[in-house]
Image: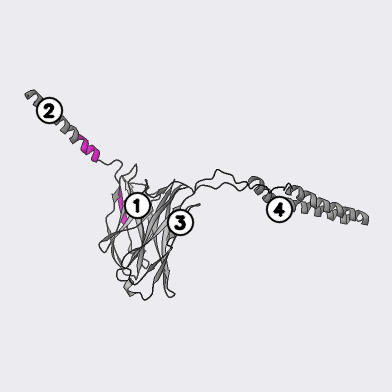
Amino acid sequence: MRSMNCRASRLVLVAGWVFALAVPALAIPSGVSTTTTLTAPSSGLNGCTQTISVTVTANGKPVTGTVIIDDEFNSNLIQLGSAALITDGVVTTRVSLVTGTHSLSANFIADSTNQASTSATVPVNVTAECDFMPAVSDITPATNPMNTLTAGQSGSATVSVIPLPGFAATLTAPMFVTLSCSGLPDGATCGFTPENVEILSTTTGALTSTMVLQTYAASNVKATPPSPPGNRSNPIAWALLLPGALGLGGLAFGARRRRWLYRLSLVALVGLVTMLGTTACNPRYNYLNHGPPPNQATPSGTYNILVTAQFSNGVTSATLPTTFALTVQ
């Protein structure tokens, strides 16, 4: 019995040492540690639009990736948008903030090489009259890496229009805010449902719209329009024969008049008409026999898409932006 107890004790001790050694190893995140810094210079304040800059480094060297811009306002944490770092590890973007005191921060998203990191909060006091601000979420369902689509895929994100607390109650008529986006790669589109959100005097929270991003894959199918049934005419033959026939008739007429100048002019005219006829038929011939070229895929890369919310009441207008980072593979 004592031998069995000793053996059990040894097994428990060994298991404890293995667990003690394994847990710290599992807790250590993979990748290189990073440092994220957010700056919001007061000189960048334009109305209620704030220009901010985010820098991310790893061991003092710039890195690439995506950062999320957060705002703590009225005890609520709001994701204003996201931005892609360019090759030197810096991105400068714009966010729109309602009147009041904000605390901005940037979160670098971990990847296979670098660890996640969060900047210190930067207080920003907006004194300009700004009645609402836009914010945009990540693509849902979540992708890995974040906000990544393969050419040919589509994704959706939620765009929120957040009114200044108490602003809606001052409205005497509905305010319509139109959403749009720019900066998309070639062959990609975006749409909003609804495209216009309506702020009423009874609105108490954020209004949302779904932004759908569509990319396109390369088409390997060549579209060749079929020839109409019974149509066996050749446009190139007609382009050559018809001007030639007219030219021969002109030459016969010139020969009867025995005037060499007419004949020379007709020869030049025949050559010109033939060249023009052939040139005019070439595009149609190529289309009917070869079809349009195949569609190209949406170019791969990372793009900063500008999402804007705009309103106008006939007296004043405002265009308020935020940024959304999209990666196409």
Local packing at callout 2 (Cα closer than 10 Å; few below 14, some 14-19, many 20+) is few
N-terminal of the pair, mark 4 or mark 2, is 2
N-terminal of the pair, mark 1 or mark 3, is 1
Three-letter code for the amino acid on which mark 2 is drawn: Ala
Which residue, given by chain and number where applicable, does mark 3 sit on?
Answer: 190
Outermost residue on the left side: it is 2
Asked which secondary structure carries label 2, the reply is helix
Which residue, given by chain and number where applicable, does mark 4 sit on?
Answer: 280
Residue 67 has which mark?
1
* Separation of residues labelled 4 and 3 (CA atoms): 38 Å
Which residue, given by chain and number where applicable, does mark 2 sit on?
Answer: 8
Where is residue 225 shown, x and y percent of the image? 63, 48
Local packing at callout 3 (Cα closer than 10 Å; few below 14, some 14-19, many 20+) is some
Pair 4/3: label in front: 3
Relative height, residue 25 to residue 172 (above, below):
above
* Residue 50 in sight in this render: no
* Separation of residues labelled 1 and 3 (CA atoms): 21 Å
N-terminal of the pair, mark 1 or mark 2, is 2
* Residue at image coords 31%, 54%: 106
Pair 3/2: label in front: 2
147 lies left or right of 217? left
149 lies left or right of 274? left
Is 270 one of the magenta-colored residues?
no
N-terminal of the pair, mark 1 or mark 4, is 1
The residue segment tinted magenta is 20-39
Three-letter code for the amino acid on which mark 1 is drawn: Val
* Separation of residues labelled 4 and 2 (CA atoms): 94 Å
- The N terminus: image quadrant: top left
258 lies left or right of 18? right
